[in-house]
């Protein structure tokens, strides 16, 4: 008797989630209008980046904030050398294109 109830409950639960199960959705159009600058024959997109503020190291009262802060510091330390390399290569390319 209890197995029958369990099967009925599981069947009802599965039927409740069945409408949400679908295959691939129709392809959505991701194109849009973006601001850009035309220089000669080149079209350069303009992207406005949000302002980033840099503060001193903080000791947070809650453990999850401390972990979040430490993860941010770790990610910045990993990405910073690559940004330096990209900046230097961009300067070299800029000088090469200027000459």
Image (spheres, grey):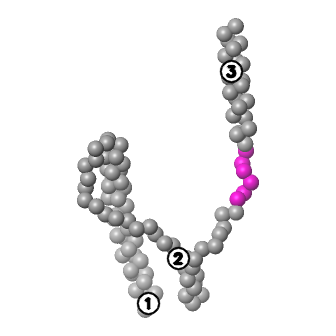
Q: Residues within 10 Å of mark 2 (few under 14, many from 20)?
A: few
Mark 1 falls on what kind of element?
Answer: helix
**Please, what secondary structure does the residue beneath circle 3 have?**
helix
Mark 3 closeness class: few <14, some 14–19, many ≥20 residues within 10 Å: few
Residue 98, label in figure: 1
Q: Which one is in front in this view, the residue at disc 3 or the one at disc 2?
A: 3
In the image, farthest residue toward the front: 61
- Prevailing secondary structure class for the magenta stretch in the rendered image: loop
For the residues labelled 1 and 3, the Cα–Cα distance comes to 72 Å
Q: Tell me which residue sits at (73%, 30%) in the image.
A: 15
| Of callouts 1 and 2, the N-terminal one | 2
Residue ID at (70%, 63%): 29
Residue at mark 3 to residue at mark 2: CA–CA distance: 55 Å
Q: Residue at x 28, y 44 (%)?
A: 61
- Image vertical order of residue 82 relative to residue 70, above or below: below
Q: Quadrant of residue 30?
A: bottom right
The span picked out in magenta is 23-28
Is 1 placed left or right of 87 in the picture?
right
Decide whether residue 85 is among the magenta residues: no
Residue 9, label in figure = 3
């Amino acid at each position: 008797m209890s197995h029958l109830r369990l099967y009925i409950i599981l069947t009802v639960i599965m039927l409740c989630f069945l409408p949400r199960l679908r295959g691939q959705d129709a392809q959505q159009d991701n194109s849009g209008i973006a601001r850009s600058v035309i220089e000669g024959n080149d079209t350069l997109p303009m992207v406005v980046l949000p302002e980033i503020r840099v503060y001193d190291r903080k000791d947070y009262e809650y453990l999850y904030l401390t972990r979040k802060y430490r993860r941010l510091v770790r990610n910045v330390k990993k990405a910073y050398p690559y940004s330096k390399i990209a900046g230097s290569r961009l300067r070299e390319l800029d000088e090469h294109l200027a000459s």
